[in-house]
Image (cartoon, coloured by chain):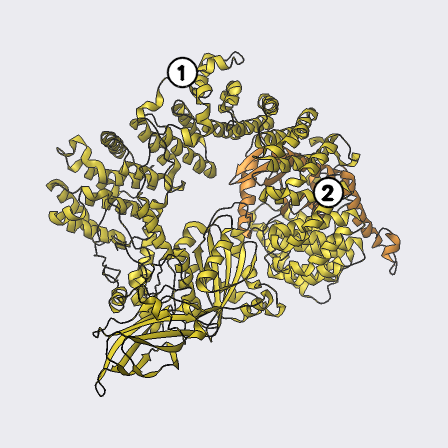
Chain colours: A orange, B yellow
Amino acid sequence: MMRFLLLFSRQGKLRLQKWFTPIPEREKKKIVRDMTTMVLARKPRSCNFLHWKDLKIVYKRYASLYFCCGLDAEENELIALEMLHRYVELLDKYFGNVCELDIIFNFEKAYFILDEFLLGGEIQETSKQVVSRAIEASDMLQEVRCCPVGTDLRSVFPSS
Amino acid sequence: MSDVVEKTLSALPSLLSLDSNAGAGKLSSTSKLGNLIRGITELTSKHDEEKLIKKELAAIKEQVASPNTTMRQMKEIMVRAIYCEMLGYQASVSYIHAIKLAQQGSVLEKRLGYLAVSLFLNESDEFLLLLVNTVLKDLQSTNLNEVCMALTAVSQMFPKDMIPAILPIVEEKLTHPKEVIRRKAVLALYKFYLIAPNQVQHIHSKFRKALCDKDPGVMTASLHIYLQLVKESPESYKDLTVSFVTILRQVVGGKLPMDFNYHSVPAPWLQIQLLRILAYLGKEDQGTSEMMYDVLEESLRRAEMNHNITYAILYECVKSIYTVYPKAELLEKAAKCIGNFVLSPKINLKYLGLKALTYVVAQDPNLALPHQMTIIECLDHSDIIIKRATLELLFRITNAQNVTVIVEKMLEFLRQSSNDYSTVDLVGKVAELAEKYSPDNGWFVQTMNSVFSLGGDRMQPDIPNNFLRLLAEGFDSVEEDRQLRLFAVDSYVLLLQGETASLPQCFLQVISWVLGEYAHLRPDQASDPGKVMRLLTRLLDQRHASAQTRRWILSALTKLCSSPVSIALARDVGERYFGSLDTVLRQRAHELMILSQDAGLRGRVLSAEGRLEHVEVDSSLSFLDGHVSEALAAGAAPYKPPHQRQEELAHEKALSLEPYGLSLPVSLSTCSITDRLTDRQSPTRLSISSSVSGNSTELSLKGGSTTLKLDGVKRVWGKEGYLVQQPKEVVEETPLPPTELPSPLGSFQSPVSQTQTASPGPEPDQERQQLASSLFVGVGTHHSVCLMGRTEAAPQRFRRKPKGTGSSSGTSEHSSNSSHSSSGTAAGNTLDSTTAATGQQISQHALGHPPVNGNPIVETPGPLPPVRDGGVAAEIPTGHTDSGTLADPNEDPVPVRPRDLPLISHLPAELSGLARSKLTTLCPGPDPGLALSSCRVYKEDALVLVVFVSNNSDSTLHRVALRFTSKQLEVSCVSGDLVEEVKGHSVATCQYAVVMMRASVDVELAGLVSYQRVPGQPRATPFSLRLSLKHFIRPLTVSTGEYGKMWLSFSHDVKQNLRLITAGDQSPLTATLDTLRDRLHLHVVDIIGSEGIVACRLLRGQPCLLHCRVHADSLAVWLRSPIPEFPDSLLYHCQKALAEA
């Protein structure tokens, strides 16, 4: 199971944090601090896997953004790496050539995408199409908002 | 992939200058969030940021409170609040509004509300209770989106106790026509299973349906549950092996829709999940394993593309192959696969290759041989992670022949590493290897010196403890022992002559102890007795030595003063610390002064022979029980351990949860947040509970307990009070499995290196070749067995002497059954000083310090036998009145007297079918013609005391009357209050119903029997008997719901950790609760997962509820009752019952 997922910039600024198990606030802060210092200190082209206490840490840098997750000891590091990659692909598909700024200013969207992809620390849906469809459905709701008052949502959205 | 996100921060400034083109469509430049983010980005100092966020939070607070804020604005505010939280600032004022938004907003606002809730709160937050209704409503909504949102929210954070409320609806969703809903429902149930396994037990059949779902997504989701289930009990799911194998075969064969492909590999996540499940199923099970060999092989074969994802599958596949029952052919293929990893130029793969090797060398150490050159390369790799993994691998292949090289490599790594966590881990490993395979004394001592100086004060405390024990106990040869000790002494003297500032405190303590004990072995000790002492004194005066260390040093000095020179030195030191502010130091200084002057006393106290004597310590301070019960009787508040006090404080602050009328004691889970978090999967799994809580709880039994088992316990005063915890720890250390080994020297014969023949390697240079041969020596042919089961067959140099098992088990039992209460400040002081001084107890332990009762501060009764205890013994010669049907087989059986049988036959018929205790003789009074015996009969509504008055003489007894007096008991006569006459050699029976008025651990019932042998001449004999609380306890049959209600209404509670009982195949919780039920007549209401609830009542009195939770390896018990004394007393009996079990 994934314990947490953090996105932070090269400067160590947190851009997104998701905790899949209940962790006290202080502990969270410590983890964020430790992760940023540990990961940022890594040289390019070194191993993407680290250890922190009894957790496996898998991180990857995409442009200016670091994606970093903590896993249970029995998890497979490589598949976690691909999990991060799939998340980036999903973000990319949604934002269209995603960049850090997209995530900074629309972090709630990034969370929504993550919630469709991972649930409770486990992968929920691996298909890019299905995840994007789910997100698109929600975004259509956003457009519905512009409809004149009184429009029946269900008529716009027949599947529901 | 990096090209996908190739826009970097460099673009940021241009964007921030507001006339942005790129990305501007997505972010409204005028939005408040946009302004906030921009504002933050422009700031340079942390301080400014803090100021800005404070302002922002104030604005948020104002806006959320305003009644004019629309839901739409609220949504925007939430986004800003999430942002503030992400920056590390608490936006707690918005939490409640996030819930409101989820409750009242339109679909879109609701979505954000749920998101905010999931980010702000976690499942133990009380706020979440407010969300339950919303979730319930949304789950039943006709809008798919709302259902999805609710399910997503539920699987992220949902209060455990509220699961029953929504479970049926979530279950219903398993049959929903939309696959996305089914999938989310399965994941929600998975989450429920993780947090409250018992609640979803009844729907296991539905999981099977999900496994067969026509949608592969739902099926994949169900595998999460199955992985968990199979992991916990593989036996129950063997029948599914075929299904899993079939699914895997279909997936590998590409039968799934293209949707599930990831980089043209079919459903890799699904494959890995299945491989894991198969590994659990096939482990140590040949039959099941055979079913999966084919598909495992196919997976191995199919995964051939050169992409990370295929390697991920391969890695998992190799792991499975090595986990299931071995098949030679497959193992070989898997081993070849590992080669691909190890030899890969990609660093991630290399790392995993090393991990895989670490894993497989346990099965066959020869597998490391083909890769030895790669391993050597990795040892010098620039990436520290790779190095670390390599050392881990080497650790697994260490034997007596390569230990020096491997340990050297490890120490080298330690010298460079700065990571605390890995240092602690590795230091432990070095110590383990050194102890196991050390080739000679000098090396061992040197290695341990490095361990202590590198490990510092962070390392596991058992490393120095083990080391000192090893020195103290020695091993088989006396001469060897002497040499080892001398080596240690010499090396420490050398160290102390140099610079000591850099040595960690724990090392200094080890040094002091060893010098104190063994400096006399030095040949120059006689000629220059002051040398070692001067070194220690110098250390004592250095500023970097902590107070703790100074205490060790003073102890060492006390042991060393044997010559006039050293006595003078000692007096000097003693005078300097005579007035120290540190009480323990001061005490030590006093002792030093006294002992250095009085050679006779020193000889007795610190005799050289007595050093290894085992010191038994009454860690429970039970001799204070009398004092405590007096204090309690006088109205003192019972002692509460600090954690409980804190909890109560927290409890007072917490929300009142009563109106919810939950089926389970909500407060347990919701109020003790901190407690829960440590117990739940906090990512660190630091066991906070271990020593701290163990210590505090062990010391905290309340109530006036007066009949403790103290046999065999010598009460010992330590220098700074009582020695509480340490001796027990020392004893409990499991001695290494006794291994048959030849003489220590025999362990490294024939350093044959098979390595040259084993691997050609790609033309390595000579140095590496040499390193390789030294590293891999002994790995291979004839040593393979030894590596596989290192523990059994390893030639172990230092073998601990087996400890006297009797004494060790005795001690631990005492500490667990012991009870202690401290109500006065005196006892409190003692406790504090003992915790402060735990570090030194080894020294005293091995020293065999007899009690030195000279503590100037802590005023406590001396090591006298407990007054109460002795008193009781004198009062009741038939000490074991306590056996009975309630009681346990362990209690000493009352010797069956020949006349027992006839006496029992006098038992009134109406009582004969009931549970009763054995007969006990009451008063062997001055009159041999009269004998009293009693027996307790446990009726559902009363405790009946039956007293048999037997007249053993020929004459008749007249007007036999019994009178009882007791403050705590109410005794009413049922029959036979006054018997007019008892004929010669006959028996009269009297029955009394006894009720305990105030709950207390046990009470004494004094009685007087009056009779007339000759009419007109009354005589009387007093007698007494003891009744214990457990005789008055009856099960209280309540339902879980009633229990929950009662729980909330009771105000007096006590919390304590008890020891768990392990018995056979029962879970420890069940075993423990069963024991309590059988011994104390409790009613086990329900057992849910790791928690159990138990209820009982006092006869004609109030109930007491127990809530038990398994916490690490102890049982955290929380007792509640409407009467204050009941929980305390009951707890005592629980402890006793468990200790006796």
B309 displayed left or right of B819: right
- Amino acid type of the residue tagged 1 in the rendering: Val
Question: Dot 2 falls on which chain?
Answer: B
Q: CA distance from mark 1 to mark 2?
A: 55 Å
> Looking at the picture, how far across and down is residue B757, in whole percent?
48, 12
> Looking at the picture, how far across and down is residue B598, in whole percent?
12, 49
Picture quarter with the N terminus of chain B: top right
B1013 displayed left or right of B291: left
Image quarter of residue B1005:
bottom left
The answer to whether residue B122 is above or below residue B239 is: below
> Looking at the picture, how far across and down is residue B218, in whole percent?
74, 44
**Front-most of B95 and B722?**
B722
Image quarter of residue B344:
top right
- Amino acid type of the residue tagged 2 in the rendering: Met
Picture quarter with the C terminus of chain B: bottom left
Image quarter of residue B262:
top right
In this figure, what is the number of numbered marks? 2
B153 displayed left or right of B610: right
**Front-most of B460 and A48?**
B460
From the image, tell me which residue sits under label 1: B752
Query: Circle 1 sits in a helix, a strand or a loop, which is it?
Result: loop
From the image, tell me which residue sits under label 2: B219
Of labels 1 and 2, earlier in sequence is 2
The answer to whether residue B980 is above or below residue B637 is: below
Question: Dot 1 falls on which chain?
Answer: B
Marks 1 and 2 belong to one chain:
yes
**Front-most of B568 and B828?**
B828
Categorize mark 1 by other alpha carbons within 10 Å: few (<14), some (14-19), many (20+).
few
